[in-house]
Amino acid sequence: MDIDLKNRKVVVTGAGDGIGRSLALAFGRAGACVAGCSRTSDKLHALEKDIDGTGHLFSTADCSKSEDIQSFHDKAISALGGIDILINNVGSVQKLAGFFDLSDEDWQEVFAVNLMSAVRACRLFVPSLKNSAAPRIINITSVAASRPGDVFPHYSAVKAGLCNLTVSLARALADDKILVNSVSPGPVWSKSWEDEAKQVAEQSGGDVEKIANEIRSSTGETLLLKRMGMPDDVTGLVLFLASDLSRWITASNFSVDGGYTQNPY
């Protein structure tokens, strides 16, 4: 079944690459008008060339900064005339390290990018969502929220906060019929993984692409489906949650992880 989102107005933060780029392209194919932001203008120019449809807006913004989110909000509302769907996708591990190798600044940076960006975006866009006939907020979190490990505890903790924010918002906005859900991807190839491959290559003197392939292969072997995820693997569920098919779903979190969490509940 094709999901029709024709003329829906969608905001995607962190749209320059990875899951955000795949989501923007998928919404474009489904007939939606997309407003997307990224810190890198070159990536937005590439997205603008590749996306289907017209009436889109792409603007540079650092979502860890309140003034940038405000500026992006103003441009998006002006260009689209309102919004129906807010995708809080922007996120970053920032630093691959254990607890004792993370400074206060490391924690604050991850907090600003992964949680406060969503808080501020929701605060700004909710007034417009209240005017929509089918309003949705979808937060992109991570399985790291429920499966924390030795590495990047700051990221796991903040993503858990985003999962909890999802439920709090769903309760606060229930009377306005704004559905709020979250999607938790598992190991999906992204810039963070690319950075890890580069870091290993620098330390070992090895070939970056060979190391990247080894990471993808070894990580995939830990999953039931025996492969690492790619950004397009996440888009189907998000489009479903953005559509009318999800009209009785709110305050829920969904894992897309190739069988990583294996949670039956």
Image: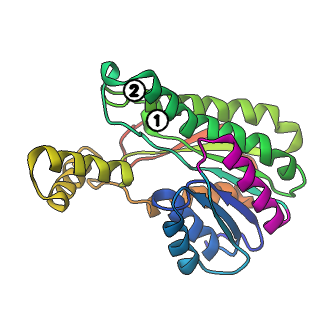
Tag 1, which secondary structure?
A: loop
Query: Disc 1 or 2, which lies upstream in sequence?
Result: 2
Pointers 1 and 2 in contact (CB under 8 A)?
A: no
User: Which image quadrant for residue 241?
Assistant: bottom right
What kind of residue is marked 2?
Pro
Position of residue 99 in the picture relative to residue 246 (left or right):
left
Residue under pointer 1: 264
- What residue lies at 83% left-to-right and 64% top-to-bottom? 78
- Tell me residue 46's x, y (percent): 50, 74
Extent of the magenta region: 62-81
> In the rendered image, is residue 188 in sight?
no
Closer to viewer: mark 1 or mark 2 = 2
What kind of residue is marked 1?
Pro
Main SS category, magenta section: helix
- Tell me residue 144's x, y (percent): 42, 34
Residue under pointer 2: 153
Per the image, is 75 magenta?
yes
- Tell me residue 173's x, y (percent): 82, 37
- What residue lies at 65% left-to-right and 43% top-to-bottom? 181
